[in-house]
Amino acid sequence: MKTAMKLAVSTLALCAMSTLALAQELRVTVWTGSEAHLKMLNGIAAGFIAKHPGVTVKFETVPVADYTQKLTFQVAGGNAPDVAWMMEDAAPAFENAGLLMDIGPTLKATEGYNFDDFSQPAMALWQKDGTVYGVPFSTSPFLIYYNKDMFDKAGLEDPNQLAAKGEWNMQKFQEVAKKITEANPGKWGFEFKDGEGYASRMTHALLPPVRAYGGELWANGQCGLDKPEAVAAVKQLHDMVFKDKSIVPPGEQGDYFSGNSAMTINQISRASKMPEAGFKWGIAPLPSGPAGEAPVIGQAALTVFESGKNKDLAAQLVAEMTSKDNVAIMAQFFPPARKSVLESDAFVNSNKLIPPEQMKSVAAAIVNGRVHPSHERVPQIFAAMSPRVDALWRADANVEEAVKGVCAAIQPLL
Amino acid sequence: MARSVSAPRLTLKTREMLEAWLFVSPTFIGFLIFFLGPLVAIFYYSTTEWNLLSQQATFVGLHNFQNALLENPDFWHVVRNSVIFALGLVPLNMALALSLALALSRPFFGVVFFRTIFFAPVITSAIAWAIVWKFMLQGEGGAVNQMLAWVGIDGPNWLREPNWAMAAVIVTRVIKMVGLNMILYIAALQSIPRDYEEAAKLEGASRLQIFRMITWPLLAPTTLVIMVLTTIGSFKVFDHIYQMTGGGPENGTLVLAFYIYQQGFKFFNVGYAAALALIMFAIVMALTLVQVMLRRREME
């Protein structure tokens, strides 16, 4: 009888303990499923667990295409994760719905954190009236990826050589794209980001040249695409697609990574695809325009949900993950927003695939770059924009009229 | 040895009934939770303005329906697209299915091979099918246009011009799904007694007459089923559009099911999406009833 009692008591105690332990599990949703990324993240989490005994951290991969959708459904179903990797385009909607916790106080109270170390442009999207909704842990500039073999074959200087001479501008970009296309029949000079420039990445296709000309997609509730600077930029792109035929046209596949286009715009994380590409390659800054250099960055941040059961602990986890040491570790995959890390040798040497001098242009773009314009109704804006942008990408389109059409469609939503 | 036998507590009938309920209960409970529940819930949702993200549901009565039917010009554009899609797909699919069935219903050497070939797309993944076609329909490098070029035709940029895009999604969808209707027609053709045909032949009927006067009327019930199923299927088409055109270009292939998805899963307007789904249900229901009534009148 005594033994039975003991057994019952110890079982109850174990149950209680396991419940306690369960209550301390922090769930982090991320979009990466890469083994290397997860190994690194788990390594960082191990450091946090060591300081907080009884706590476990679980990284949950949600595929990137459905990421925001699934996160929304988790939140709506009362099952929000403790910490979420939040994409820049989704951030305003989550912020405005009051779903994200102000983690500023926790970060600032963390010893040795040095909140001011984060580059201000990089923090712009995640701070409002002194409230900190997230910490950017991947601030990834848009870069030109080029196929060195195709440049050599056409006898042309590559974008880095041109940039070193200060000649890497929009005019030169059009010129080399045309020459390369002529030298490589059946291939193209340039492919829009991920080959999606006429669909899901239509704004990513327009944004770099529009900014280089001094324009903007939208700002302060006003559509900017019909302004003269933007029109000039779009006209140049339109000419490149339909007159020079140097950009992969709509309805055509011209994958850069398979060697079918000489240049594309993408982020540093895509460098991992390059070793299999089978050609010599490099990265260079975006071409400058009449408005000078206008780097564009894409961002993701770590955020904590207000409804989480362990939100204070979750905020501490974010502080740990974005500490100076851990940001330096993550820099190999996710470019940092901490100035001290950006300026360090560790960063320029962090990526085995990219030479240090090219990494320097990455660092410069992070410090000066601006994110894609945001809005809480981005999905609606894109849906309204999409048919009008389709009309723009026709050979016989009147660019000026077409961009006016785009603005007319999105203005009511801005 | 006397044994006292207690009277059974339940009558045989009650016991059988209880057992019957017990056996159907797993399915029945599943039906209630997973089928009837959502069906009832959707009526409720359709009367709310519910933004998933901010988790606020406000009762708005019939406002969602009023907005869709009277105020939202996109809605009628989308309905128009769905109707064009159905009008293109249903007759083409049925005519092709019947032709294939007529050709493949009698045994001949290699018939199984041909049936398999035409049925294979039905069991192919819809997404894989759409991706392959997307490549084949490229403006310049696509296989379709290259083949057209051999015979001197300069093919259009299929998926980038609104009218051609609609035609392209219809035809590729027909090729994908025609095998199913073909099998239904073959089954129906094989169940027609051969005596009728032989008798007609003896009377001197031509093949066309046999088809018109015997085969076609006897296929009527199958034709009705196929017509109803294909129409419903064409209004529900989603995966094919999602992968091939994403509703573009210029919203030229934005059909109802895709629009509902957009409202519910992209904009998170769950209430509005529910109302649209009910409207789609009503349209499909009405079309089905019309088809059944027309067929009945024809048979009388």
Image (cartoon, coloured by chain):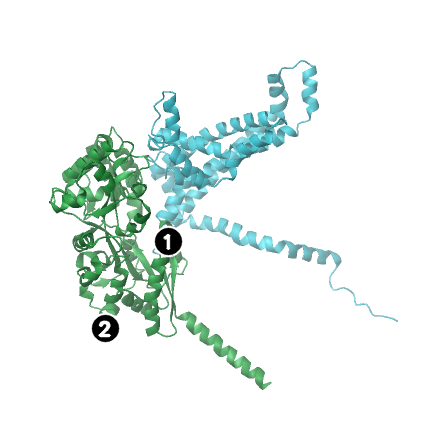
Residue sitting farthest toward the bottom: A2
Chain of the residue where label 1 is placed in the rendered structure:
B
| Res. A414 visible in picture | no
Residue A42 percent coordinates (x, y): 35, 64
Q: Which of labels 2 and 1 is toward the front?
A: 2
The amino acid beneath tag 2 is Glu
Letter of the chain in cyan: B
Residue that label 1 marks: B52
> A304 or A306, which lies in front?
A304
Marking on residue A111 = 2
State the residue at coordinates (54%, 83%).
Answer: A6
Q: Is residue A175 left or right of residue A261?
A: left
Residue A71 percent coordinates (x, y): 37, 56
- Which of the 4 quarters of the picture holds residue B252? top left
Seen in the picture, residue A238 relative to B210 is either above or below; the reply is below
| Res. A345 visible in picture | yes
Colour displayed for chain A in the image of the structure: green
Residue A16 percent coordinates (x, y): 46, 76
Q: Is there one chain holding both mark 2 and mark 1?
A: no
Callout 2: helix, strand or loop?
loop
Q: CA distance from mark 2 to mark 1?
A: 38 Å
Residue sitting farthest toward the top: B204
Callout 1: helix, strand or loop?
loop
Residue A385 percent coordinates (x, y): 28, 40
Quadrant placement of the N terminus of chain A: bottom right
> A340 or A136, which lies in front?
A340
